[in-house]
Image: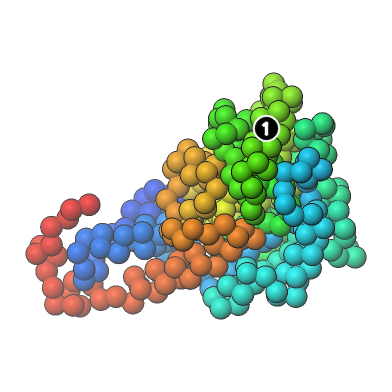
Amino acid sequence: MVELHEILREIKPLDKQAIEKGEKICDQLAKPLGALGKMETIYARLYAMFQGVIDISKQIVLVYVADNGVVAEGISANPQETTYVVARNMLEGKTGLCAISRHVGSDVKVVDIGCMKDIYSDQSCKVRRGTGNILKEPALTREQAIEAILVGYRETLSCIQKGYKLFGTGEMGIGNTTTSAAVISAILNLEASQVTGYGAGLTEGMKSHKTQVIESAVACHAPYKDVLDIVSKVGGLDMLGMVGTYLACAHHQLPCVVDGLISITGLLIASKLNSHVLDYCFASHVSTEPAYRLVCEHLGLDPMLLMDMRLGEGSGCPLAFFLMSNAVYTIEAMPTFSEGKLSRDDYIDIR
């Protein structure tokens, strides 16, 4: 079985010269220089990943399902059972993510990495049934955290072997905005009040309580040795599964799209293990959760959409899939300056 340290050692940065080749293709098109904005930067990065022959026709969102013990502290308006119910709905194609994915033409894979109730009869992906209550005990052991990463890696590798070329990360787990905020607070040394949002919906009083739980949990488990120590103590299985997906995509030089808060928390963790992972990731939209913007700025990400979305599930990913596919088609279908009987010298580069 492949070991985590081997994966991390083999991840390489994206070839900057190949990115520049992609940029030159965009600059030869019959248009003002840089006029397609992010479509051009998306194309150039994809050009480098696919060595000039871009194929992102087969797309999938991996949804990691896991429960969180901290729900016992009353940090969510939804009962823990909601995790299982929504996961089952996903299998039947009855969620927002599923509807968006059908329209776009992308697929969804549900991975039971830690739901309290069994979603499948085969439990080979399940690390444990829910995490510990982070206010009273560590969420996981370090060994379980590493195993969760490897589950995500293996599930993504299986999809790669089936021909998938473009990936997205999604989740389902009541209480996971609390664990994500705790991880972000500990990694970036931010106050709980800076990273705590309303999640799926809270009253002001409930949000205040959630903030206090996060602050107390982060404090009681300190000090932290490294990023794996942080996520083992105050994190969750869903974000760790996502880490595995990010590592697998980077390892195989394939693009991966980030959704919302839990998704970007997974990327934050992955980036602390190997910063080259960021070369292969694309942010889909700006989540309404306050911690999202803070992590986005820390990682230097530039989201494609501003739509006030806070659904989770991975719902931003298929929207980004469409934009990325359109960027590739548009740039490869447009005429060059010579084909369009235009002169590049007539255009001033204002980038």
Is disc 1 surrounded by few (<14), some (14 to 19) or many (20+) residues within 10 Å?
Answer: some
What residue is drawn where x is 36% and y is 59%? 38
- Residue occupying the far right of the picture: 121
For residue 304, what is the image quadrant? bottom left
- Residue occupying the far left of the picture: 346
Label 1's element? helix
What residue is drawn where x is 57% and y is 29%? 191
In this view, the residue in front, 198 or 1, is 198
Question: Looking at numbered disc 1 in the image, what kind of residue is underneath it?
Answer: Gln
What residue is drawn where x is 57% and y is 34%? 193
Above or below, 39 against 1 in this view is below
Query: What residue is shown with label 1?
Result: 212
Residue 319: percent from left, percent from top:
51, 67
Above or below, 330 against 217 in this view is below
Residue 114: percent from left, percent from top:
81, 52
Residue 142: percent from left, percent from top:
78, 34
